[in-house]
Image (cartoon, rainbow, N blue to C red):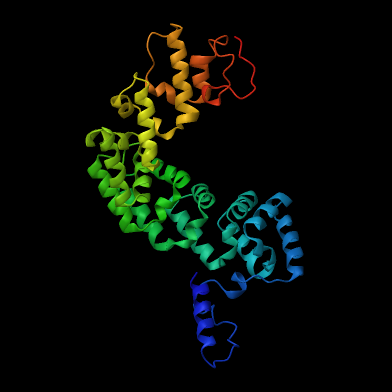
Amino acid sequence: MICAQLRKSVASFLGKSNVSLFLPVNFFSTVAAPSVSELLPHKNPGNTDSLTLFLKENGFSDTHLERMFKGKPKLRFANVETSVKPKINVFQEFGFSRSEIVNIMTNQPEFMRRSSKCLRLLLYQLHNLFGSNEKALKFLLRDGWIFSSDMGKALQQNVQFLKITGVSTQRMDKIVVSHPRVFLCNHEKLKRSVEKLEVLGVNPSSNMFIYALRVLISLSRRVWDLKLETLKGIGFTESEALIIFRTAPMVFNVSVDKFKRVVEVVLATKRYDLSSIVTNPFCFSYSVEKRLKPRFQVFEILEKRQLIHQWPSLSYACLSDEKFHKSFVAQYPEIFTGITCPAIGRKQNEKPLVN
């Protein structure tokens, strides 16, 4: 990024002056860590052939190469000796297997565009922070965006802060796999988010802590306030709205219109009230048309046939397709013969299930 910005600045400057266009070869490499030879593609057809041969010798299949070059087309012109081989050597230095290297470079080809020095520093820091290549590998595979931030500063500060805060090693591992960008966000923003979670009653030892942290980091103050006010406007108390957040923080990623629509459909059944939603807030995560409505229809049919005396808890409407089908549909194949809806565990054109 720095190198690209500098090239633009120099180009602009040269356009307004009589300075020679012939800059020293090492001009940019003295400014930023990546060398020009590593960052700029060598558009020599011979490079493509030698690169393909070299990568295949190191475990890359045609499928791997197609995927990698599709994501970063210019990589096919990279120089084997000055750009590709040094990076593979770095991964090998840190003990990564051939298959792991192939996996990383195929899924995150952005690493191919970085200097060996930068890559070595990254792996060193990840290994020190996470203690194993296994965890470092999960982090690398999840997020190639890592290079777009001040990794050395943000990553170390955030990991150490979360440890001091009381986040267990097990939960740190989950963050690595599911939400790696938590480690790379602005450190001050992370601190403010953790402090706010404490005020909201979300403890670092809670199973929902990492999800709540991820949501809070992603929402601006304005959007957070808007969603909180929307829930209160619907009829929830502030206390109930915060219970919803602590129980299922991920639902705060849905739109305010989705909040309103789900409440409208749930209350329209006249079998559930707002307290049902407070107890089962995950219902906000599901599709109204493809999940909630079809399942409410099933409950209604069973009630009319006197096969159930009252509707089950709202949590049953949130079961997986398989569990819902087993609990409410498979037992009555003669009733649901004409219904082919994935939300109740039946695929289109599927024949009625007979026990």
Report the residue that reaches farthest toward the top.
306
Image quarter (top left, top right, bottom left or bottom right) of the C terminus: top right
Front residue of 305 and 321? 305
Indicate the position of residue 99 as horizontal and vertical percent values: 64, 49
For residue 6, side relative to residue 236 (left or right)? right
**Residue 105 seen anywhere in this rendered image of the structure:** yes
Residue 183: x, y in percent? 40, 53
Number of marks drawn: 0
Q: Is residue 247 above or below residue 164?
A: above
Residue displayed at 45% across by 25% down: 293
- Residue nearer the viewer, 276 or 68: 276
- Judged left or right of residue 129, residue 46 is right
- The answer to whether 2 appears left or right of 24 in the picture is left
Task: Give me the residue at 34% from left, 25% from top.
Answer: 267
Q: Residue at x 54, y 71 (%)?
A: 34
Front in this rendered view, residue 351 or 174: 351
Residue 82 locus on image (x, y percent): 65, 70
Residue 319 visible (yes or no): no
Q: Position of residue 49 (x, y in %)?
A: 76, 64
- Relative height, residue 44 to residue 228 (above, below): below
Outermost residue on the bottom side: it is 18
At x 38%, y 46%, the residue is 214
